[in-house]
Image (spheres, rainbow, N blue to C red):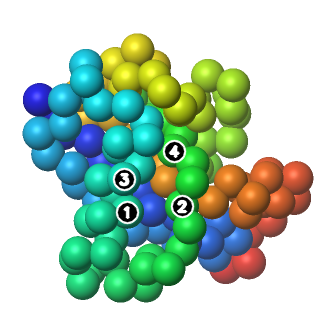
Amino acid sequence: MSVLTVRLVRSFEYRNVKNMVLKNVDLENTTTEQLLDVVLKEIDANRAYLPHRGRKYDTIKIYYKAHQNKPNHLVINLGDDDTHILKPGLTLAAQGIEQETELSCFINEEYEAYKSNPENKW
C-alpha cells in the first residue's frame, strides 16, 4: 500500500492547483481508470474540493517521482507525454508509479491548449 499525491489542476494559466493525498493505494492492482474513479469520488465527497466539482477530469500524468528531479514548471510536467500520461487498462505499478509519486489530474483538452501556448496569466 502506497501514498500518492494527486494534483488537481483547475487552471494551467493561473496556476490553480489543489493537492489530494491518497493513502493505502494498491499499486499492483489499481488501474488508471480505478484511480481516476477514486479521485472523482473524493472530489464529490469532500468539501475541500468544492471548486473542482463538476469538472470532467479525464487524464492523469506523472508530475514527479520521489528522489528524482522536480520539473521546472509549477503546474505540470510538460515533457514526455508518451511515457508520463497514464494509459488506460494498465496497473499503476506497470506504468512506473511508486510510493510518494506526485500525479497531475486534469482535462486533456485544456492541457493541449495550454501546451500549444504555455502562457501564465498570473
Q: Amino acid at mark 2?
A: Tyr
Report which quarter residue 99 is drawn in.
Answer: top left
**Nearer the observer, disc 3 or disc 4?**
3
Asked if residue 103 is positioned above or below residue 47 in the image, the reply reads: above
Disc 3 and disc 2: Cα gap in Å?
A: 10 Å
Judge the density around disc 1: few (<14), some (14-19), many (≥20) Cα neighbours within 10 Å: some
Q: Is residue 89 left or right of residue 115?
A: left
Q: Residue 117's quadrant in the figure?
A: bottom right
Q: Which residue is mark 2?
A: 57
Badge 1 or badge 2: first in the primary sequence = 1
Q: Is residue 71 left or right of residue 93?
A: right
Mark number for residue 40? 1
Q: Mark 1 near mark 2, Cβ–Cβ under 8 Å?
A: yes
Report whether residue 67 is seen: no
Give the amino acid type for the residue marked by disc 1 in the picture: Leu
Q: Mark 1 and mark 4 in contact (Cβ < 8 Å)?
A: no
Circles 3, 4 touching at the beta carbon (< 8 Å)? no
* Marks 4 and 1, the one that precedes in the sequence: 1
Tell me which residue sits at (49%, 53%) in the image.
105
Give the image location of residue 96, x and y in percent: 41, 18
Badge 2 marks a residue whose secondary structure is loop
Q: CA distance from mark 3 to mark 1?
A: 5 Å
Is 44 located above or below residue 5 in the figure? below
Residue shown at 61% from the left, 22% from the top: 83
SS at mark 4 in the image: strand
Q: Residue at x 56, y 29 (%)?
A: 87
Q: Is residue 99 left or right of residue 55?
A: left
| Circle 3 residue | 37
Marks 3 & 1, CB-CB < 8 Å contact: yes
Locate the C terminus and report the quarter of the image it occupies. bottom right
In the rendered structure, find residue 60 and report the number of the disc placed on it. Answer: 4
